[in-house]
Amino acid sequence: MKLWLKIICISLLLYAGVSSLYHPMTPGGLSVSASELHPGRNDFTFTGYGSHFNDAMSSLQVFVTSDTSGVYCAEVLQVVDNAHVIVSVFLPDTLSSNNLGFFANNDLDGTMFVESPLGSEGFTFVKGTANDLCEYKITNSEQQFFGFPFQPIIMESIRNLMWHVPMWFTMFALMIFSFAFSIRALGKNGGAVIAEYDLKASASAGTGLLFCVLGLITGSVWARFTWGAWWTNDPQLNGAMVVFMVYVAYFILRKSTPDEDKRARLSAIFNIFAFVLMVVLLMVMPRFTEGLHPGKSGNPAFSKYDLDSSLRSVFYPACFGFILLGYWLFTLNLRMKKIEIEHETTH
């Protein structure tokens, strides 16, 4: 690989690595302490993440909302610290909706929202109920322009997006190379030319399998943090493991066939089958199955909730950097295989 491509690769990976760890998180609402809401006075603690309740005490407001037609201002009783504030709110007997939630707003953090998981005893819910609304505001955080988005379940592990997903993209790119080399190999009659394409297909698939393993490891760690288990019955996870085993079988097939021309043709046919299976399991099937991966339920593409501007500024350079790294490792792998062959022929 050319020197300037190596410099770009290293620069992009350094940028992605530092930025993925250094980028701050946008402040967000973490939880509320109440067990249920009821008509009359309700006291609870609002807990923020990366928030500045104490630093921005003068502009702090907390609200309870019942859909968009009922917003009730809470009285701030005590600001415990930057992450905790104790408040009290008075709620009427009749609300417009049982879709309750909590907002906190200040000039530094903007607006943080926590959807209510609480019970609601004693209320009458009448759609379109007119209630006296308090004055409230919805603003963005001062850090929102450059901060990673706050996701209650993913939390800080969202930084793994810049490692886990680019590894899979790199695997796909390398398997595409391998697929193309195998097609070229089948188009040759034999001899040194088919052996050359077979060697390139093998080197590319081997490097791609390395990134497949890295993707499985980083995905398993991420699953343990967000889903509570190292492995779950998710279609994309199971499909990735099947793909891994199929490509392992590809290398077992190569080792079991001593004849070079026969090995090249059988390997090429099997490699084409493996690539088609990979596309079906990792790109087609997730569109039609329910899964835990973000953006599923019929649309596995990134949405505006999964990938905002701050993530894109790190994610796309990371993808490009990892793909260049994959190509670099492929060239080294290919060179090592050629040296091994030369060594065997001379001895």
Image: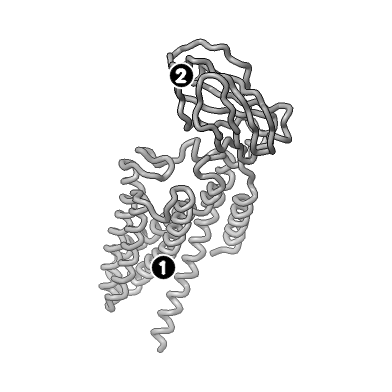
Residue lying furthest bottom in this view?
Answer: 347
Residue 347: % across, % down: 40, 89
> Left or right: where does residue 106 sit relative to residue 180?
right
Mark 1, Cα crowd under 10 Å, few <14 / some 14-19 / many 20+, is many
Amino acid tagged 1: Ala
Please state if 283 lies on the left or on the right of 221 as rendered: left
Q: CA distance from mark 1 to mark 2?
A: 67 Å
In this view, the residue in front, 169 or 333, is 169
**Relative image position of residue 107 (x, y in whole percent):** 69, 29
Can you tell which quarter of the image residue 270 is in?
Answer: bottom left
Camera-side residue: 91 or 286? 91
Q: What mark, if any, has residue 123 been given in the picture?
A: 2
Q: Amino acid at mark 2?
A: Phe
Query: Is residue 149 at all visible to an observer of this figure?
Result: yes
Q: Is residue 194 left or right of residue 141?
A: left
- Residue 127 is marked as none
